[in-house]
Image: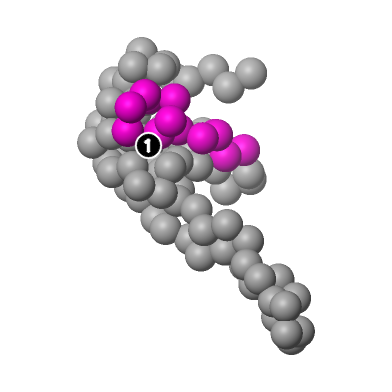
Amino acid sequence: MKDQYDVIDTIVLSEKATILTEQSNKYVFRVNRKANKIQIKRAIEQIFKKKVLGVNTANYDGKKKRERRADFGRAVHWKKAIVTLAAGEKIDII
């Protein structure tokens, strides 16, 4: 990746992600599918200036659309990263 802003797409603000943030200081991001854990860690540290302890990733297939028709398609495949920050570190979302 050329730039750290190419690695991180968005932060995920779901109910499960909020619970992870409150209970175990983990933040959920939607990232580039080609990014690896080292690139994600460096991008978070450079953008937010926080110490990252670990990164877990998961690949998701896009949902099928119009499945029972001849012109079916898919939503875009995507990748999720769960980033664990050091104790005392916090990312201000808003």
> For residue 15: magenta?
no
Residue at 69% x, 76% y is: 72
In this rendering, would 93 be left or right of 58? Answer: right
First to last magenta residue range:
1-13
In this rendering, would 63 be left or right of 56? Answer: right
Res. 54 in view: no
Residue at 63% x, 45% y is: 15
Between 92 and 88, the residue placed more toward the observer is 92
User: Furthest residue to the front?
Assistant: 71
Identify the residue position indicated by label 1 in the image: 83
Name the amino acid, label 1. Answer: Val
Q: What kind of element bears circle 1?
A: strand
Does 71 sit above or below residue 16? below
Residue 44 at what x, y percent from top left? Answer: 37, 25
The N terminus lies in quadrant: top left
How does the figure colour the protein chain or chains? Answer: one colour
